[in-house]
Amino acid sequence: MAYTVTVLYDGYSRMEDGRMRANCTCTLVKGPITAIVDTMTAWDRDKILSGLEKNNISCDDIQYAVGTHGHSDHLGNLNLFTKAKHIVGYTVSYQDEFFIHPFETGEPYTLDDSLQIVPTPGHTTADVSVIVKTSDLGTVVIAGDLFEHENDIEDPSLWKFVAGSEKPDEQEKHRNQMLILADYIVPGHGPMFKVTPNMKKNARETAESKVT
């Protein structure tokens, strides 16, 4: 059984009347392992339940509930998934048991040959991304706030300053790695987008310039 990636809800971030309004993209991964990535705010419970129902999935079907980092708009409904192992940034837990995994050294958390969770720090010091090999879209990276949305490729100020970056050099490095790897990227606050040949070319050139 191959994996599919379904965006349940597109995230957003915008200024309205001098106030920031934001919510994260919520994504369902279906296949040999079923996972949900980034569960929106605590006020979105009914939306999560509705999105899962439309995809014939119950909360108890979810085996892994992933929060790409520890911000509240990405973690609000983890408590719906009590049968799942939780991965929040670099922390892996089930009920009151915590599991040691060396994300800090760059080690992927591999679930199977087509699904893994990799450390991509930058936005925070403990961000992760989910890499899914699918039959229809190729390699999809569910990247959380490593990418704010597609526009931040042309306008880096959106991820560096508007969204904020704790380690911009690290974030840029991991952004380039994911652009080179992915066919599609699910960003933290916008619709999934296709990685174009020009995006890959620029990412390779930037990555090479940092080495030389």
Image (cartoon, rainbow, N blue to C red):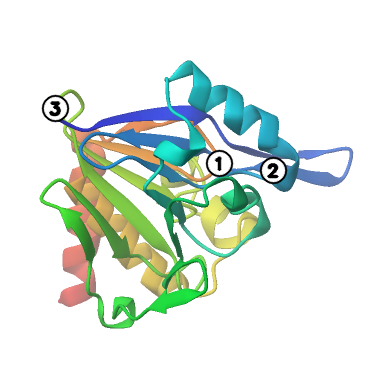
Residue 62 visible (yes or no) = yes
Image quarter where the C terminus lies is bottom left
User: What element does badge 2 sit on?
Assistant: strand
Looking at the rendered image, the disc whose residue lies closer to the viewer, 1 or 3, is 3
Give the distance between the C-alpha atoms of the residues marked 2 and 1, in whole angstroms: 7 Å
The residue carrying pointer 2 sits among few (fewer than 14), some (14 to 19) or many (20 or more) residues within 10 Å by Cα, namely some
Q: Residue at x 49, y 40 (%)?
A: 149
Q: Which mark is residue 135?
A: 3
User: What element does badge 1 sit on?
Assistant: loop
Q: Residue at x 69, y 43 (%)?
A: 22
Residue hosting label 2: 22
Q: Please provide percent x and percent y for residue 10.
A: 54, 30
Viewer-side residue, 78 vs 83 = 83
Amino acid, disc 1:
His
Give the distance between the C-alpha atoms of the residues marked 1 and 3, in whole angstroms: 25 Å
Q: Is residue 44 above or below residue 157?
A: above
Outermost residue toward the top? 54
Q: Please provide percent x and percent y for residue 101.
A: 30, 77
Residue hosting label 1: 189
Amino acid, disc 3:
Ser
Image quarter where the N terminus lies is top left
Q: Tell me whether the residue at label 3 lies in contact with that at label 2, contact meaning CB atoms closer than 8 angstroms.
A: no
Left or right of residue 141, residue 84 in this image? right
N-terminal label among 1 and 3: 3
Q: Residue at x 23, y 72 (%)?
A: 210
Give the distance between the C-alpha atoms of the residues marked 3 and 2, in whole angstroms: 32 Å
